[in-house]
């Protein structure tokens, strides 16, 4: 459903992605993980069509991005992209914005109104839904952004750090349950970047680990543990894959503190 083929992307003269290829099957939820600055957000922006790669190309459901106006429009109608720090119209109310996004994706009006109300209730936004977004906290703004992505009901979702941005525990719980349901559906494909290993381990079919601009490993959470020779948590597995010295430094520090 999502194919990134030999992607190379630079910022200035610095390579961020280097000959990266990644395929996400229909119905999969794939998590993208790696240290800060390793190219996670860039990878998702390229997949979403926000950035045009210097080399390589992207295909969504067999259609090549930017190959024609018709293909790109067809892709955009089937794909939603949520940036880590997405733009919001501050003078608009949360309800108005969610409905407007749904209208862009041609959601039936009756279904749109009903789904919007359910999303508002899901994320506990009842008291703020009809107030300008400028009056929302950062966490409430994140909930509106998430609601706008979910209202589209697209078969392809590209989500950059959906669990970040000041979500409170109830918001994290609600989103986690929604993502679990999406992961169980055969008609929804999700590519998601998040720095929280325990959340990825609970919902992802496979995890792509980015290091130094390349895909270091791409497997199920259990498969990554086997590759790393680690029987601990996923965060320990990621450190062992990308920066094995970190665990040694932690052990050395703790031993020194106990003397």
Image (cartoon, rainbow, N blue to C red):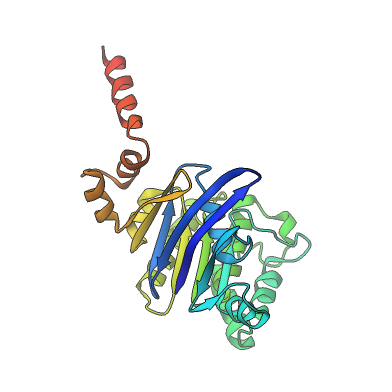
Q: Taking 68 as reference, is 57 left or right?
A: left
Residue lying at the far right of the rendered structure:
91
Residue 131 at x, y percent in the picture: 73, 63
What residue is shown at x 44% (from left), y 72% (from top)?
Answer: 189
In this rendering, the count of numbered labels is 0
Residue 193 at x, y percent in the picture: 48, 55
Residue 235 at x, y percent in the picture: 34, 43
Q: Taking 216 as reference, is 161 left or right?
A: right
Rendering quarter of residue 89? bottom right
Please name whichever residue, 5 or 223, is drawn nearer the observer in this view of the structure: 5
Rendering quarter of residue 208? bottom left
Rendering quarter of residue 144? bottom right
Looking at the image, can residue 124 be seen?
no
Looking at the image, can residue 172 be seen?
yes
* 166 relative to 63, above or below: above
Q: Taking 96 as reference, is 200 left or right?
A: left
Please name whichever residue, 254 or 128, is drawn nearer the observer in this view of the structure: 254
Please name whichever residue, 157 or 213, is drawn nearer the observer in this view of the structure: 213
* 207 relative to 116, above or below: above
Residue 207 at x, y percent in the picture: 36, 57
Q: Quadrant of the C terminus?
A: top left
Residue lying at the far top of the rendered structure:
259
What residue is shown at x 39% (from left), y 74% (from top)?
Answer: 27
What residue is shown at x 71% (from left), y 72% (from top)?
Answer: 96
Residue lying at the far front of the rendered structure:
55
Q: Quadrant of the N terminus?
A: bottom left
């Amino acid at each position: 459903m999502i194919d990134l083929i030999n992607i190379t992307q630079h910022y200035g003269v610095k390579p961020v992605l280097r000959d990266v290829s990644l395929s996400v099957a229909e119905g999969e939820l794939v998590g993208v993980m790696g240290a800060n600055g390793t190219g996670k957000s860039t990878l998702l922006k390229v997949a979403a069509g926000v950035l045009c790669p210097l080399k390589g190309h992207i295909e969504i459901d067999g259609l090549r991005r930017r190959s024609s106006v018709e293909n790109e429009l067809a892709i955009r109608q089937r794909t939603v992209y949520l940036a880590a720090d997405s733009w919001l119209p501050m003078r608009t109310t949360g309800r108005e914005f969610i409905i407007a996004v749904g209208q862009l994706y041609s959601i039936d009006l009756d279904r749109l109104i009903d789904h919007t109300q359910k999303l508002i209730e899901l994320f506990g936004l009842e008291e703020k839904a009809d107030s300008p977004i400028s009056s929302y906290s950062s966490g409430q703004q994140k909930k509106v952004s998430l609601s706008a992505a979910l209202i589209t009901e697209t078969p392809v979702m590209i989500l950059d750090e959906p669990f970040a941005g000041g979500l409170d525990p109830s918001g994290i719980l609600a989103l986690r349950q929604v993502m679990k349901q999406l992961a169980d559906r055969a008609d929804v494909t999700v590519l998601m970047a998040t720095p929280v290993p325990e959340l990825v381990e609970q919902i992802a079919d496979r995890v792509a680990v980015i290091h130094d601009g390349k895909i270091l490993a791409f497997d199920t959470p259990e498969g990554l543990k086997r590759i790393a020779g680690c029987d601990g948590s996923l965060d320990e597995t990621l450190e062992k894959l990308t920066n094995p010295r970190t665990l040694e430094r932690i052990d050395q520090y703790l031993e020194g503190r106990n003397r």
